[in-house]
Image (spheres, rainbow, N blue to C red):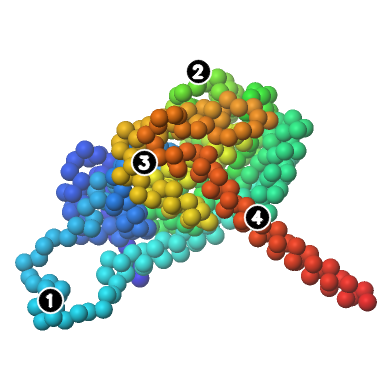
Amino acid sequence: MIVLPKISFLNKYAQKLQKNETANADSQHKAARPADLAHIYIYDVLKNNTAFKGANFGANLAPLSKDTVSFGAASQKKGAQVKSAKQTRAEKDAAVGKVRKPTKTRQNKRLDNTRRTSIHLAESVRGEVDFAYKRLKNDISSIFGMRVLDADDENFDFTYDSELLSNISNEKPVLAIISRKKSSKSLAEKMGHMLISSKKDAIERIHDIVGVRILVSNSDKKSGEYVADKLFKAVKNGWIKISEIEIYRNPVLNPPEKYDYISEKRLDEIAAVAKKKAKQFSYSTSKTDFGYSAVHIGVDLPGGIKGEIQILSPKVAAFKEIEDICYKGLSGKGLPTGYGKLRQAFAKIDPEINKDGYDEFAAYTRQAYAYERTKRSKDKGPFLSLPEGSKIPPRLDFNNIAKMKEEIDSARREKVVRRMAEEAEKLLGDISVKMQ
């Protein structure tokens, strides 16, 4: 197991990178070489991004700029080696005609050790927040008088579709509430980007390890007002503690504030009460570069853990899953668990798309989010297609990515159905034997 650099060093290095974004990346990298940057998962991130040329794309479409620390240009020099004046082992072998079996390099061994360390720590963090996660689900369920669907549940796809369709047809103000805990893989990657190497630091700095998503009507303002009423009452009565409110708006929509899920006036009222009860409170409004529109509310949970409540519509939420896959695929990040086959859509993309192409894809993403935001909850139909004559490869059309994802999801659902049928058949057989 490798010894990780002290977090104080890593934090100072991250601050240095942020302050010197236009400085020579290679000189910064050499300055950090004594500590080797051996922190959680960062070698994996650097390794995956070495050949990625569209660095600006990641900056344009990253879900939240504060979530990541960009190592862009610095990482591209990672594999470079300084030529030594001494004769290398390979040169000595060549001189005597000796052939060695390929073995893992020291860096690859370090990569493996770092990856194992990061996943182990991420799993430890997930265990630490388990009580707070259950508390958040119970509180939200009580506040809204609805069951909260766990996105990690094996039968989630079936229960979610049933709940959503039923509540849309009955014109309920809240269409579904979903909970989720960050996966170990996703959490380890985020900890790596944020240069986090301890459980305590992860809990203090990552505010979305656990969260719930409240899905409201796309077009009915009463839906958002209903949610606002419930949250205001909950904060006033001390049922939940809100420490942050963020409004994300799509600049393509005109005017953007017209499409807020909850009016700014109502959020101001919630903020006024929350400020009095929270130790620290922040409130912000921003237009997202990639077009995502939602309201995010940070809540304080037991044990100093932070949780997140997202408020958006089912249409935008469904598209966000596809956009998130595209963002991770194009920026070299790990795809969501179970969707490794989608990597083929992003393979060898650099020769086909230049910086203008990435900018066009960002514009396409903003328009696609706006398209979903203006749909009614009952509307059906595909996502926005690539414009005619686009420089973007056709395989990156959101509908193509969605089709590939659906094939994977269908295969997984079929496995679940087969397993349930086998279990039911076995259960009926056991009952039949007992009755004889």
- Residue density around tag 4, few if under 14, some if 14–19, many if 20 or more, within 10 Å: some
- The residue at which mark 3 appears reads as 58
Q: Left or right of 176: which side holds 24?
A: left
- The residue at which mark 1 appears reads as 94
Q: Secondary structure at mark 3?
A: helix
Q: Amino acid at mark 2?
A: Pro
Q: Residue at x 58, y 35 (%)?
A: 382
**What whole-number distance in Å separates the C-alpha atoms at marks 3 and 1?**
43 Å
- The residue at which mark 2 appears reads as 255
- Residue density around tag 3, few if under 14, some if 14–19, many if 20 or more, within 10 Å: many
Q: Amino acid at mark 1?
A: Ala
Q: For this rendering, which residue is in front, 344 or 136?
A: 344
Among numbered discs 3 and 2, the one appearing first in the sequence: 3
- The residue at which mark 4 appears reads as 413
x and y percentages locating residue 331 in the rendered image:
37, 46
Q: Amino acid at mark 3?
A: Gly
Q: Secondary structure at mark 4?
A: helix
**What whole-number distance in Å separates the C-alpha atoms at marks 2 and 4?**
41 Å
**What whole-number distance in Å separates the C-alpha atoms at marks 4 and 3?**
32 Å
Does any portion of residue 353 appear in the rendered image?
yes
Among numbered discs 2 and 4, the one appearing first in the sequence: 2
